[in-house]
Amino acid sequence: MINLEQLTSKVCEIAIEGGKYLASERKTFQKDKVIEKGSHDYVSYVDKETEKLLVKKLSELLPEATFITEEKTVKFEEKDYCWIIDPLDGTTNYINDNTPYCVSIALSHKSELLIGVIYEVCRDECFYAWKDGKAYLNGTQIHVSDKGSLNQSFVELGLPYNAKAYKPVINHLMDELYGRASCIRINGSAASDLCYVAAGRFDLYIEAYINIWDFAAGALIVQEAGGNITNFSGEDFMKGHHIVASNTLVHNEAVKLLTPFLGSL
Ligand code: IPD
């Protein structure tokens, strides 16, 4: 039987080690090292080397687990335990020396999330949670906010790479929320967006066309901090790419905003 609390603590050490490598490479990072793997979707040796480091350390920690990783430096195999890794979430921020960016690591067992760890490099913040163990930031328990309506909410929106398909949605959300919500931000790192909901900094975060390595760790952190995370229909998010994460109190209001797009995304 795995002790999730102890395992989480070791995963935090590994995520921080990955983050320190990112920070040290950033000092001399050159934009000519960047490759465009999809439209405006970038990667460099830094993402790949960080991923290799994480895979090596996590394999030693739990040899029976397989991997799903953004940069595909390791082959996925069908197994019960699975590490889900984004070695550098917020790559465009990193490339442009902007904040935030993170290492994101989740552990699942038969699709159930057991551990979520996100290390946000720029503020030296390690967010983590394990199933039924609550959520923490650098050793202190965190909780979602208590804002009761969208009118009071500090809202984070994502701009996924799939701009053409998402433009009608983001235009609609801007139209509905700008001037109504307390304020809107677009920070450029799905993993940290979820952590900020968990820590009560944002009350709501909406994004589509993101991948399991972008949201798996953050999803558990949000849930263990008392928040809610669903797809755009208010249902299970795990198998899809579209997410709404909130402090729970504003969730229904947020999901209602998305009803014009159900079935078309
Ligand atoms: C991206 C970031 C970004 C989000 C994109 C993601 P990456 O992840 O999370 O905030 O808008 O959709 O793909 O490429 O930096 O790992």
Image (cartoon, helix red, strand yellow):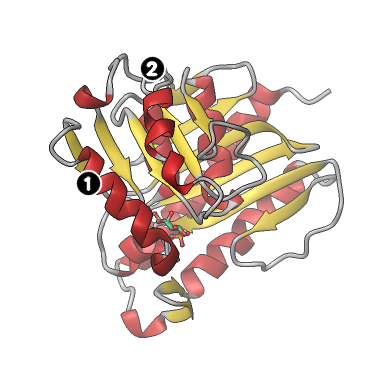
* Residue 224 horizontal/vertical position (percent): 53, 21
- In the rendered image of this protein, does residue 10 appear above or below residue 50? above
Q: What residue type is labelled 1?
A: Asp
* Residue 179 horizontal/vertical position (percent): 13, 37
Residue on which the image places disc 1: 175
* Residue positioned 21% across, 41% down in the render: 184
Q: Quadrant of the N terminus?
A: top right
* Residue 244 horizontal/vertical position (percent): 45, 37
* Residue positioned 69% across, 46% down in the render: 83
Judging from the image, what secondary structure is the residue with disc 1 in?
Answer: helix
Q: Left or right of 105: which side holds 201? A: left
Using the image as rendered, state which of residue 72 and residue 165 is in the foreground: 165
* Residue positioned 67% across, 33% down in the render: 113
Judging from the image, what secondary structure is the residue with disc 2 in?
Answer: loop
Task: State whether residue 67 appears in this view.
Answer: yes
* Residue 159 horizontal/vertical position (percent): 35, 57
Using the image as rendered, state which of residue 116 and residue 255 is in the foreground: 255
Disc 1 packing (10 Å; few <14; some 14–19; many ≥20)? few
Q: Left or right of 254: which side holds 174? A: left
| Sequence-first disc among 1 and 2 | 1
Q: What residue type is labelled 2?
A: Leu
Ligand 1: give its quadrant: bottom left
Disc 2 packing (10 Å; few <14; some 14–19; many ≥20)? some
Using the image as rendered, state which of residue 144 and residue 149 is in the foreground: 149
- In the rendered image of this protein, does residue 53 appear above or below residue 84? below
Which numbered mark, 1 or 2, is in the foreground of this view?
A: 1
- Residue 252: quadrant of the picture: top left
Q: Left or right of 62: which side holds 115? A: left
Residue on which the image places disc 2: 249
Is the distance from the Cβ of mark 2 to the nearest ligand 1 atom less than 8 Å?
A: no
Task: State whether residue 138 appears in this view.
Answer: no
- In the rendered image of this protein, does residue 207 appear above or below residue 110? below
